[in-house]
Image (cartoon, grey):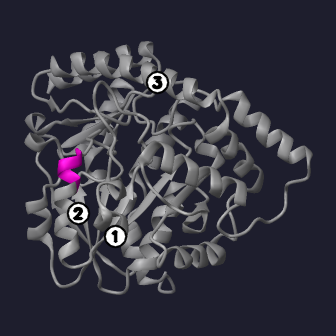
Amino acid sequence: MDSLSKRVTSVTPSLTLSVTNQAKAMRAAGEEVYALAGGEPDCDTPDFIKQAAYTALSEGKTKYTPASGIPELRQAISNKLKRENQLNYDPSQICVTPGAKQACFNAILAVIEEGDEVIIPSPYWVSYPEMVKLAGGVPVLVETKESNKWKITAEEFEEAMSPSTKMIILNTPGNPTGSVYSREEIEAIVEVASYEDIIILADEIYEQLVYGDTEHVSVASVNEEAARLTITVNGFSKSFSMTGWRLGYTAAPAELAPALATIQGHIASNANTFSQYGAVAALEAPESGAFIENLRGEYDVRRQFMLGRLKAIPNVSVVEPKGAFYFFVNCTGLGLKSVNLCDKLLTRYKVAAIPGVAFGHDMGVRISYCTTLDVLNEGVTRFEEFCRSH
């Protein structure tokens, strides 16, 4: 239609949702599909969180809240960031959003003007470039190297900078690669960003899902310059299996925080009211630590199982993911573009995976291990059959 804005027509629909919906449709039609495409924990939200939301509902907490969230939740987030991440944000610097995706978009809208450039390491989460386009900005995609565990270096960041650069997006732990930036790597990137006061959007939604001796380091915590330049994004979807609750948040420097609250107020009014009371319980209930520890332990078992199986498959390669719950499999040796590969894998072998082109790397696929070991075992067996046949 001629009436559609250029802003909308420039945006690509989400391939991750497309593949997930196709797999669900096949399953609904009676086909057995081995879903390795998921982006959410496969367990239910803990009962103590649900109970807090039930209580809020029964007490009539069903009206609008302040745009930035209920005071109790903003204080709980402030306490959590100080306790776990060594970040000092006053509750007034925190804005609760309808999901971490909205938090990212609010931050981009607050900073990016028409023609501003945003540096995005590739492979990247599918929505980053599209959010930048919707804000009128220009995504500058920087290819990272498998040999560097799919992480951008300070040198690559500096080389990609221009007078129009306004922001860089760092996702640690990362989707789709599972890569985790070290303190030293973050410090080097912050040093480059400080040359031109480039804002760092730090998406840390997978922070609790790190494995072995890997440490999650919050970008804003490494030094004063990092705190001055960083907008931290986090949420409840991954750590607490609350994807459908739609709760995220930003924690921003004092001069940026009011703008984020203003955008939030005009776009969504506020995040779901009774969900926010559930989130308070997620952060403050004594059961929370054990839930996260058990979740992390279960995913680590699956991660190690998948790592061994994938490394044995010819013509593909993987970097051991240190966080999140994905493998990014480099399939260059198969000679197939990722959409074609995933289409054949789904229609012929009944295995759902996400094409790498959605993440900026057209010769790879993302495989998720947030499903049962039985499904993983059969799914990776079929994936291996596919790879050997090609």
**Label 1: which secondary element:** helix
In the displayed structure, does residue 157 sit left or right of residue 70?
left
Q: Residue at x 64, y 78 (%)?
A: 266
* Residue type at the position of mark 1: Leu
Locate the C terminus and report the quarter of the image it occupies.
Answer: top left
Q: Dot 2: within a 10 Å radius of its alpha carbon, few (fewer than 14), some, or many (20 or more) residues?
A: many
* Residue type at the position of mark 2: Val
Of residue 78 and residue 273, the one placed in the foreground of this image is: 78
Task: Give the residue pinned by disc 3.
Answer: 371
| Span highlighted in magenta in the image | 182-186
- Residue 355: quadrant of the picture: top left
Q: Earlier in the sequence, mark 3 or mark 1?
A: 1
Q: Residue at x 67, y 53 (%)?
A: 73
| Membership of 201 in magenta stretch | no
Q: x and y percent of residue 291 in the render?
A: 57, 26
**Label 2: which secondary element:** helix
Of residue 28 and residue 234, the one placed in the foreground of this image is: 234
Q: Earlier in the sequence, mark 2 or mark 3?
A: 2
* Residue type at the position of mark 3: Thr
In the displayed structure, does residue 20 sit left or right of residue 75?
left
- Residue 302: quadrant of the picture: top left
Q: Earlier in the sequence, mark 2 or mark 1?
A: 2
Q: Residue at x 8, y 69 (%)?
A: 159
- Seen in the picture, residue 293 relative to 202 is either above or below; the reply is above
Q: Does the residue at mark 2 contact the one at mark 1 (Cβ under 8 Å)?
A: yes
Task: Give the residue pinned by disc 2.
Answer: 190
Mark 3–mark 1 distance (CA, rounded to whole Å): 37 Å
